[in-house]
């Protein structure tokens, strides 16, 4: 494939944008090479500036659950835009999408819209602190909740030590209130709770992790967290930015039948426009300004174009619930095909999947947390990534990402992908 124009555009971008990208995962730093500049997308396909076509397994990192340029979403945005793009006043459509979200998701009475997943998680933690009057939070290594200061924390030297920031600019004062646990390790969490009695406001996690590849929760892990939270007056926060409106109409709460106290959303809920949201029972949400003391705001929150896109997306998913089964089946088909192709070529691997979230780690051992994910062979991943790209298959340029499956993928696309994996596997 020819990447001439992408290379030239990347050169120009690097002069005026740090690293040439507005979000680091878009650069090919983890895999090497020049990022591809996309000109347009439709259905399951991306088209780059050099005219190359790709089957897309990133799907804007999740939102395009029904494919790119999905007509009802595009039409809704265009129609709204004609009436003005932002007013900074309440609008009817905000209530409509809120009503639908509250209907689809279990255990929430009220929802507030923001502009990104980062904002949703940041606000959820502030609300948890305001509601409980406690300051510390527990997060899990390898779970990503956006780039707000409290979440950019890596492990200290043991469960008792405070977290240390893993980005310059995050203060030690902030880091000390974020405690870090190992995903799928209930004892680790219990230990942190016992060592910090009466101090933990919330436990936040991706209930099905998607930011270290896909790592489903072990049997009993979410239920154990729920019990621990109930016993210690801690709020359980599910970050459903990836899983919400994907793993089931009501997200992980519905799919795995465990209830969270606060749920955060992003991606699908905005239909590809900048939207995030957080939601909870009324007694918790009513702590927010203007009726409660916990401040949270946004000039463009509930923006009409963003709400129009999100509403069109949720209406489609709510009225055609067979879509959830269909994307699961497509992902299972892909799972089986890729597994067979890698096995036939003796490439050691582990595939994790729950519903329409799937990832491949080049490791023979089970991948159940961040450290087992980090032990996989990144060198093979890089070759796999570039091999697939040359075959017109676009997966995320990092081994720590999940593939996002869209309903727009046909079984022919899936067969092409499996054939490409088979071809590339021979070279690994
Ligand atoms: N939470 C999760 C689980 C995510 O995957 C992401 C983004 N990938 C975020 C939060 C942050 O969302 P945003 O990039 O919209 O700020």
Image (cartoon, helix red, strand yellow):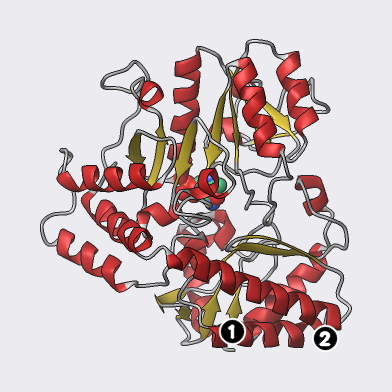
Residue 58 is left or right of residue 116, and the answer is right
**Residue 421 to residue 327: above or below:** below
- Residue 257 location in percent, x, y? 57, 43
SS class of the residue under badge 1?
Answer: loop
Q: Is residue 175 visible?
A: no
Q: Are marks 2 and 1 in contact (CB under 8 Å)?
A: no
- Residue 293 location in percent, x, y? 34, 15
Residue 371 is left or right of residue 315, and the answer is right
The residue wearing badge 2 is 426
**Residue 9 to residue 372: above or below:** below
Q: Quadrant of residue 165?
A: top right
The residue wearing badge 1 is 392
**Residue 147 to residue 1: above or below:** above
Q: Quadrant of residue 227?
A: top right
Q: Is residue 126 visible?
A: yes
Q: Residue at x 81, y 70 (%)?
A: 380
Between 254 and 287, the residue placed more toward the observer is 254
Between 12 and 232, the residue placed more toward the observer is 232
């Amino acid at each position: 494939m020819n990447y001439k124009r992408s290379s030239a555009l990347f050169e120009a971008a690097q002069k005026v944008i740090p690293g040439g990208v507005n979000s680091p995962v878009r650069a090919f730093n983890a895999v090497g090479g020049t990022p591809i500049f996309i000109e347009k997308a439709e259905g399951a396909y991306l088209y780059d500036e050099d005219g190359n076509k790709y089957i897309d397994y990133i799907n804007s990192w999740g939102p395009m659950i029904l494919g790119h340029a999905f007509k009802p979403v595009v039409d809704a945005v265009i129609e709204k835009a004609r009436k003005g793009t932002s007013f900074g006043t309440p609008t009817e459509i905000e209530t409509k999408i809120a009503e639908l979200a509250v209907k689809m998701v279990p255990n929430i009475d009220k929802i507030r819209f923001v502009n990104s997943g980062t904002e949703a998680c940041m606000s959820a933690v502030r609300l948890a602190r305001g509601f409980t009057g406690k300051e510390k939070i527990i997060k899990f290594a390898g779970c990503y909740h956006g780039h707000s200061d409290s979440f950019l924390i890596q492990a200290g030297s043991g469960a008792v030590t405070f977290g240390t920031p893993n980005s310059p600019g995050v203060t030690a004062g902030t880091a000390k209130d974020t405690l870090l646990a190992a995903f799928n390790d209930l004892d680790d969490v219990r230990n942190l709770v016992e060592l910090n009695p009466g101090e933990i406001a919330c436990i936040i996690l991706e209930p099905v992790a998607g930011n270290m590849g896909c790592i489903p929760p072990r049997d009993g892990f979410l239920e154990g967290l729920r019990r621990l939270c109930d016993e210690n007056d801690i709020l359980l926060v599910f970050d459903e930015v990836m899983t919400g409106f994907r793993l089931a109409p009501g997200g992980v709460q519905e799919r795995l039948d465990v209830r969270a106290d606060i749920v955060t959303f992003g991606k699908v809920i905005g239909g590809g426009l900048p939207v995030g949201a957080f939601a909870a029972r009324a007694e918790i949400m009513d702590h927010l300004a203007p009726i409660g003391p916990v401040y949270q705001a946004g000039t463009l929150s509930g923006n009409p174009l963003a709400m129009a896109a999100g509403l069109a997306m949720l209406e489609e998913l709510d009225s055609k619930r067979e879509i959830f089964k269909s994307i699961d089946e497509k992902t299972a088909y892909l799972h089986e095909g890729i597994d067979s192709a890698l096995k036939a070529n003796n490439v050691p691997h582990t595939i994790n999947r729950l519903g329409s979230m799937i990832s491949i780690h080049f490791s023979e051992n089970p991948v159940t947390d961040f450290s087992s994910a980090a032990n996989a062979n990144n060198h093979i991943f890089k070759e796999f990534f570039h091999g697939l790209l040359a075959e017109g298959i676009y997966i995320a340029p990092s081994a720590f990402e999940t593939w996002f499956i869209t309903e727009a993928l046909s079984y022919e696309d899936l067969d092409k992908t499996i054939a490409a994996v088979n071809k590339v596997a021979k070279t690994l």
